[in-house]
Image (cartoon, rainbow, N blue to C red):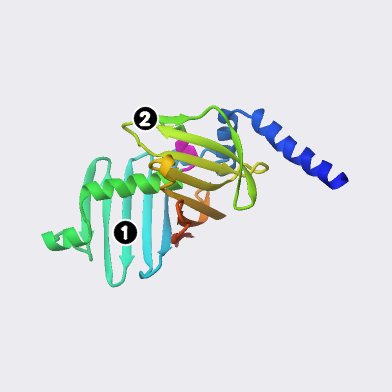
Amino acid sequence: MRYLLLIIVFLGSNVFYAQNITAEELLNKTIAFHNPNNEWENFNGTFKVLMNRPNSSERLSIIKMNLPKQQFSLEIQKDNDVYGYAFDKEECTTNLNGSSEISDEDRKAFRLTCERGKMMQNYYTYLYGLPMKLKDPGTIIDSTVKTKTFKGKEYLVLKVNYEEEVGKDVWYFYFDPNTYAMEVYQFYHDESKNDGEYILLEGLEEINGVKMPKTRAWYYNKDEKYLATDVLLQAEVK
């Protein structure tokens, strides 16, 4: 009976805590954990992402971001090819195996278009800029902080929608209730269909003062089918 009472008190305290922390407070606390010295706003650094997925060879992505100067480059190394995109503000260039002269056939095969490059820039800036990117214009954060048990652990959860011109998916972000570290995120295109994916985050890698997830493992929401894992690596200093 004593242990049952302790469990009830513990669960009740978590629910009470979720009801007494606002969405803004939770977001500020998790940003303070991941970006303690406000380094993200002036981020200028390089990191690598190694991706593994079933039935495919490894893909190494080298990402360079200079947010103050609005510069971004992505170099992809896969099999025997090296290709990528570079942006200096809105000026875009592409390259394949050291050359900017790319045939239409290769451009199509490697998806070497500036539209694709812009999508990749937004992708990496968003995911590795979380949770700070939740402060961006067009982000609509539900005012209610929920508690939810996911994979056997209880989290504080923020629900996020976006203005139509920003995005149409609904996202959920899961934070450790003690450290406020972001440990899971999940998105749906249509939540009633249980589509979309969830991403499990494990470990931290500090890049230029920002604590980013070390490992991300991707799964479908619907059947929990495993999709891929990517690992964040420090870039060598040259």
Residue 198: percent from left, percent from top: 48, 50
Relative height, residue 163 to residue 180 (above, below): above
12 or 89, nearer to the observer: 12
Mark 2 lies on residue:
163
54 or 224, nearer to the observer: 224
Number of callouts: 2
Question: Principal SS element in the magenta part?
Answer: helix
Please state the extent of the stretch shown in magenta in the rendering: 130-134
Residue 159: percent from left, percent from top: 50, 35
Q: Residue at x 42, y 50 (%)?
A: 45
Q: Amino acid at mark 1?
A: Glu
Relative height, residue 18 to residue 111 (above, below): above
Mark 1 lies on residue:
75
Residue 162 left/right relative to 13: left
51 or 191, nearer to the observer: 191
Q: Residue furthest bottom?
A: 80
Residue 10: percent from left, percent from top: 76, 41
CB of mark 2 within 8 Å of CB of mark 1? no
The answer to whether residue 103 shows anywhere in this view is no
Q: Residue at x 38, y 64 (%)?
A: 60
Quarter the C terminus occupies? bottom left
The answer to whether residue 192 shows anywhere in this view is yes
Q: Secondary structure at mark 1?
A: strand
Q: Residue furthest left?
A: 104
Q: Amino acid at mark 2?
A: Glu
Q: CA distance from mark 2 to mark 1?
A: 31 Å
